[in-house]
Image (cartoon, rainbow, N blue to C red):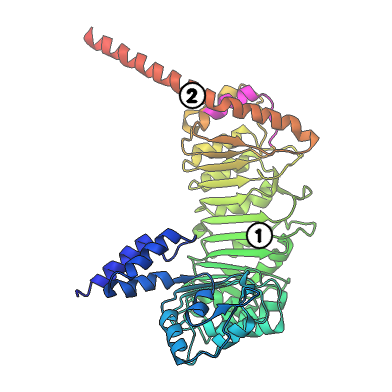
Amino acid sequence: MHHWIPDIAQLIFEFVYDPIRTEEDREGRATVVGLARTCRAFQDPALDVLWAQLHSLDALVLCSGGKRDSNNNLIWDRPLYDADWRILAQYGKRVRALTISPQSDTLDISTMQLLSCFPVPGPILPNLTKLNWLSDREDFFPFLRRFCGPSLTTLSLSPISWSVRKCAAIASLAPSCPLLKEFTCVNAEDSSMQAISEAVVGWNRLQVLQVGPLDEHALTHAGSLQTLQDLRFSILDLRSPVLEFCSSSAAMKISIPSPSSFYAFIQNIHFSTQRLHLFCERYDGMFPELFFSRLKGCFRNPVELLELGLVKTIHHNRSIILSSIMLRPLVSFKGLNYLNLADLCTSHIDDTFLEEMAVSCPNLHDLYLGDKGRWLIAPRATFDGVVSLLKHCHQLSSLGIFFSATFKSDFTDMLQADAINLNIRNFSVGASPISDPMDVTVVLSSLIPNAIRIDHCAQGSAELRDMEERWDTVNTWFKSFVSARKHSWEQGWLEGKAGVGKSAIA
């Protein structure tokens, strides 16, 4: 038999029955099972595909003499003999991904205890590369380490509550799987910080780290990893550790208690990241006036920052209003292509600031300024500021902005050829006040003709109901105006072409 046949057969089987599937494919599985029985050359590659990904331990228990009891629990009702362990090892070595789901109650604890008596040294599944341990069962956690081996590169944990046994199991993980590249435990809380931090400092090849709070030692270690591509953590207190995050390619996501606590936290921190996203859990009644100024000081080279976002995970607080002066440090981030301040009230930013930002950050693709809130405070920005953004940021594809959609003079002043943007598909105005829907539709259909629709806040207060109706009117007319303008342009082009032809003949 040619040595390529098993490899080719495996590729065919993976095409028929994708081992990294997200949904069960019974038809594909049956096809591969049938092919496995065709000849010996097909058997091994077919079994590799069938066992590559397991969503429970059921198959391993059943293939080695286990059964379901009267309560539907999987058990071994007799001792496992050498032949059983051999079968278990034969199939276990083929498993590459395993999920212990939250619905793992059908697995009896005695079964897990017996499984952990696997007579071969090392992990039960020696070639396991991905483990999703999503069960919160405390009696299972002590067995976690038996599934973590040198081949493991991805580990996800999702405990709902924390205990001493769970923390002890996690703290001692690093020696078992030293080559781990991805670790996720986003539901971690204060009581688990020390355990997770101890595990994190033992991994030196991490590419993805998504956790809750970490201590200073673990943050220092994570910040020093050049392999890191995605870092997510939360901060708890107001201490300002001295930290250096060296990996420029890492996307950083930080959950912060409030803007003022983050302001204190970053006092002695330096970022080299190109992507920084902050998730604010609450407001403590104030937004530091120098927040963005201090954030700018955290970057040795602000030009390298490509993405910046500050998202609130709470209800809007209308008492906090960002002004042009507070946001002016943002113009130093000249390389920005993504800026998300949609959740913040930007009523006090003006057209001068918008023009300055547009000139300083011409590479913006996505820009969101205050378009998520139902603000009742009149915005200072007008159509002039929007036109400045369209003029200078030619790559804009998504724009959300809180502005005054009114005209102090003739609206045709806004219809400038160099402000037309054919890339914008998403345009959001939030709770922007609007005067005449007809004039606004004329302007927007000219400047952003390829927009899918004009998004705005809905189901707001009584004060905003009139605004909602007017923006609904704009949406109703928008496509018709775009089509009419396109038809008029095409008709004019044809007439002009015909006129040129007649002149040439004459």
Q: Which residue is mark 1?
A: 279
Q: Residue, x 41% and y 82% (percent of image)?
A: 90
The answer to whether residue 185 of the structure is visible from this angle is no
**Neighbourhood count class around disc 1 (C-alpha, 10 Å): few under 14, some 14–19, many 20 upward:** some
Q: Say which quadrant the C terminus sits in.
A: top left
Q: Main secondary structure of the magenta part?
A: helix
Q: Position of residue 366 (x, y in %)?
A: 54, 47
Instruction: Left or right? Give the position of 451 relative to 309.
Output: left
Which structural element holds mark 1?
A: strand
In this rendered view, identify the residue nearer to me: 430 or 322: 430
Q: Nearer the viewer, mark 1 or mark 2?
A: 2
Which structural element holds mark 2?
A: helix
Determine which quarter of the picture holds residue 314.
bottom right
Disc 1/disc 2 C-alpha distance (Å): 41 Å
Above or below 177: residue 20: above
Q: Identify which amino acid the numbered label 2 is placed on.
A: Ser
Magenta span covers which residues?
432-445
Residue 433 in the magenta stretch? The answer is yes
Indicate which disc, 1 or 2, sits on the residue closer to the N terminus.
Answer: 1
Q: Which residue is mark 2?
A: 483
Question: Extreme front residue here?
Answer: 70
The answer to whether residue 20 of the structure is visible from this angle is yes
Q: Say which quadrant the N terminus sits in.
A: bottom left
